[in-house]
Amino acid sequence: MTENVKDLLIQAGGLLKGHFCLTSGLHSDTYFQCAKLYQYPDVVEKLAKELANKLMGVEFDTIVAPAIGAVIFGYEVARQTKKRNLFVERKDNIMCLRRGYTLSEGERVVIVEDVITTARTIFETKEAIKDFGCEVRGVACIVDRTQGKLDNEFKIYSLLKSSPVTWKAEECPLCKEGVELIKPGSRAGK
């Protein structure tokens, strides 16, 4: 499925090359815009089915996805796994459950994201739900850019593992070359 996901991203215009400021604040020459896939419900369904297959051995009750990037994909993964679906969203720049959503003590959760690089949003999602006493059983995503750096923190189930080069802003060679910086993500700032 690895090459197929990459091909689907390319076909949808979701694999971009240039100079990007990622949601994490890191800079990269590659950006995965998974939202481009969401234009095609049949593609989202296919990818969600594939991820649901990867989650078959995981015992869980609920999908929780961070808004805005993973809401559609989280919903479709929940549909494919026949699990409950919730999302967290920002209020005053802090991720939280809203809209009357709650979790129960001991409820088993899988966090679904579109792309993970530093997992900052995953940590924020985990923090948003911790007071409910639920248990995070894993993290599932379309693209995992973590390069194994979070293996001690989370079990990550992904459709594509990718290792594009990233730099801290102050070390970015593209900045030094004067290449225009693009911030395509949904998070304000940086």
Image (cartoon, rainbow, N blue to C red):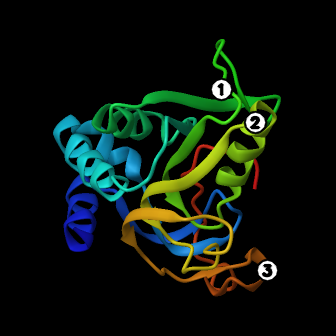
Q: Which residue is mark 1?
A: 103
Q: Circle 2 — which element?
A: loop
Image: 179 above or below 14: below
Label 2 crowd (10 A; few <14 / some 14-19 / many >=20) = few
Q: Which residue is mark 3?
A: 170
Q: Residue at x 80, y 36 (%)?
A: 94
Marks 1/2 in contact by CB < 8 Å: the verdict is yes
Q: Which residue is mark 2?
A: 133
Residue 63 image offset from top left, x and y in percent: 49, 37
Name the image quarter holding residue 155. bottom right
Marks 1/3 in contact by CB < 8 Å: the verdict is no
Looking at the rendered structure, the kind of residue marked 2 is Gly
Residue 113 image offset from top left, x and y in percent: 51, 49
Residue 58 image offset from top left, x and y in percent: 44, 53
Earlier-in-chain disc, 1 versus 3:
1
Residue 188 visible somewhere in the drawing: no
The reply, left or right, for residue 96 in relation to residue 47 is right
Looking at the rendered structure, the kind of residue marked 3 is Glu
Task: Say which quadrant the N terminus sits in.
Answer: bottom left
Mark 2 → mark 3, Cα distance in angstroms: 39 Å
Mark 1 → mark 3, Cα distance in angstroms: 41 Å
